[in-house]
Image (tube, coloured by chain):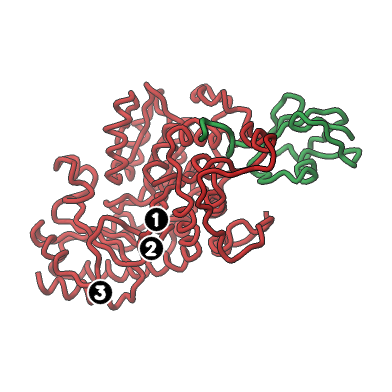
Chain colours: A green, B red
Amino acid sequence: MRLTINGKEETIEKNSVTVAQLLTEMNVEMPDMVSVELNGDFLERENYDGIEVQENDRVEFLYFMGGGSLIG
Amino acid sequence: MADYKPKTFEVHGKIEGRIKSGPTTGIYQSTAFEHETAEDIENILSQRKFGYTYSRINNPNLTAFEEKMNLLEKGIGAISLSSGMAAVSAALLSILKTGDEFISGKSLFSGTYSLFTDLFVRFGIKPVFVNSTDIKEIENAVTKKTKLIFVETIGNPRCDVPDLKKISEIAKQAGIPLVLDNTLATPYLFSAKDFGADIIVHSASKYINGSGNAVGGVIIDTGSFEFRNNEKFDDFEKFKKYGALAYLAKTRRQVHTNLGTCLSAQNAFLLSLGLETLSLRMKQHCDNAKALAGFLENHKKVKKVSYSGLKTSEYHETAKSQFYDNFGGLLTFELESKEKAFKFIDNRTFLRNLPNLGDAKSLIVHPASTIYIDFDNDTKEMLGVNDRMIRVSVGIEDSEDIIREFEKILEKI
């Protein structure tokens, strides 16, 4: 299945995958601290297990912990 | 997450997915962090990928400490800061804005009182002080402008204990969060989330550190208050995209990172190390404090002892229902006069005369002439301080030695 993850085309060797499984599949670090946007909508954490990602979906991960706020 | 007990989390922190290395994390004494590609840094700074770039924003030592505190307070996330005062400031400034009011217990650490009355007031944020053990007074203080309730689990230095279940019910009824300073109780004594605390703050410099060698603070979001889609907190609109982590995102990004209240890597390391023995130390602090309070209560030269572990304390029943058999390591006692209090301090042997608490070593201080010196007598009285009072942070030495030390000094004065 082809997905766009963080703006980049990725291929997952599975036909169906939940958001929770996708976090594992993509080796997402600190999964408890990431928010997930699916096709422009931010998902509720408690739904990660129930929502399936479809072919050509756009997925964005968003961490509140890092980010660029006037560094350096 | 596997169901481990708090003592195991104190020692190990996060267990699943932990990095296999030495018994400690090491100290990441680096201002900034290099990455292989330009894209890597871009992904981190655009918040798409987890990673470290600059230690004001994040650092592996900070993450390790935050994970431990989050596990111990059963939160959804934590933010470490440069001090307990930084934690109180950031926790509240994330929620409050000009024109808001908030309710605060008036049994308060002097720094917190000063922050509320000297700084917050300057920016049009109004504290409404109440007796935190008077539930009716708290209820009556709630107005449309009230945005949160702030109390200390055990008041410093009054040693009073508010009924936190009831206060949390008032907060829920009013649709506002309860922000709790859990410094004196620590997660060992008090499971703040189970009693309805929404946001928890600590001065980690105290019992969490345990050795008086690092200043730090921490905020934990228990995840029980919904700031999103809430008219009262329209300021959170911009942070909705972080989902349940909206409060943590706003506090970290808008307040903490911009103010630059970052904890140092070295101090985060020392605080994590301190946590490894928190339960062992707290048990000993509590046992020793109970024994000392009992001794002082029966001494003819002591006029008053404040410690909720004493059956004669007006806060004993509430404390028992919240802390079970442990009542903390801090107590105050009063002598006949300020002169007697000074004489007591000057006749010590192993006790340390310094303005800190939560150290493994027993500490004494005369609050009125030190921590509260900037306040007039009326304010001191309001905050539970008087000239005759000595505050004792009971250490983990042998309790017989502690009591003998107090006995000897009392004989001399």
Local SS, label 2: loop
Location of residue B300 by image quarter: bottom left
The foreground one among B252 and B27 is B27
Q: Amino acid at mark 1?
A: Ala
Local SS, label 3: helix
| Callout 2 and callout 1 share a chain | yes
At 42% from the left and 42% from the top, the residue drawn is: B87
Q: Earlier in the sequence, mark 3 or mark 2?
A: 2
Q: Nearer the viewer, mark 1 or mark 3?
A: 1
The x, y position of residue B208, in whole percent, is 43, 57
The x, y position of residue B304, in whole percent, is 19, 60
Q: Where's the C terminus of chain B, which quadrant?
A: bottom left
Q: Earlier in the sequence, mark 1 or mark 3?
A: 1
Residue identified by numbered label 2? B211
Residue identified by numbered label 1? B214
At 42% from the left and 58% from the top, the residue drawn is: B209
Within 10 angstroms of label 3, few (less than 14), some, or many (20 or more) residues? some
Q: CA distance from mark 3 to mark 2?
A: 21 Å
Q: Callout 2: residue from which chain?
A: B
Q: Is residue B376 above or below residue B62?
A: above
Q: Is residue B104 above or below residue B27?
A: above
The x, y position of residue B25, in whole percent, is 56, 59
Residue identified by numbered label 3? B403
Q: Callout 1: residue from which chain?
A: B
**Residues tagged 2 and 1 counted as in contact (Cβ below 8 A):** yes
At 14% from the left and 52% from the top, the residue drawn is: B387
